[in-house]
Amino acid sequence: MLVLALVAVPLLVLEPAGLPRLRALQKELDEAHADNDGLRRDIARLRVEVRELKDDPAAIERIARQQLGMIRKSEVVFQFGR
């Protein structure tokens, strides 16, 4: 029985469904954890942005100017050719 165990265990560990598969799964798990951490950071940043948009009129104006190119009615835009 001991001889059988000494022969069978290394074969089972080293076959493709054994230790190499375990290492591949561990690497995939580590990548998933890293992706989750990045997504958590993105969620935190977006929550801050939402809070600013709800509470701060200056933030709304900043986004309207930067992302939408909006201006106030009282402003004049000068465009210079290159």
Image (cartoon, rainbow, N blue to C red):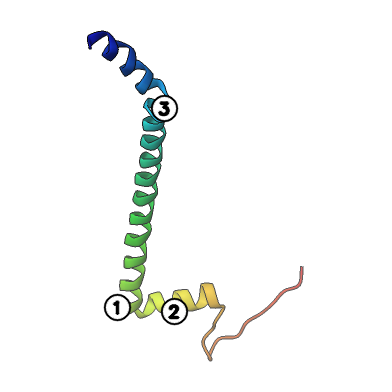
As drawn, 31 above or below 46: above
Residue at 33% over, 17% down: 8
| Residue 71 position in % (x across, y down) | 54, 83
Q: Disc 1 and disc 3: Cα gap in Å?
A: 53 Å
Residue type (three-letter) at the residue carrying disc 3 = Pro
Which residue lies under the disc numbered 1? 55
Quick one: label 1 or label 2, which is nearer the N terminus? 1
Which residue lies under the disc numbered 3? 20
| Residue 3 position in % (x across, y down) | 27, 8
- The part of the image, by quadrant, that contains residue 1 is top left
| Secondary-structure class at tag 2 | helix
Residue type (three-letter) at the residue carrying disc 2 = Glu
As drawn, 11 above or below 76: above
Taking the view exactly as shown, the residue that stands out farthest to the left is: 1
Report crowding for label 3: few under 14, some 14 to 19, many 20 or more residues within 10 A (C-alpha).
Answer: few
Residue at 23% over, 10% down: 2
Which residue lies under the disc numbered 2? 61
| Disc nearest the viewer among 1 and 3 | 3
Quick one: label 2 or label 3, which is nearer the N terminus? 3
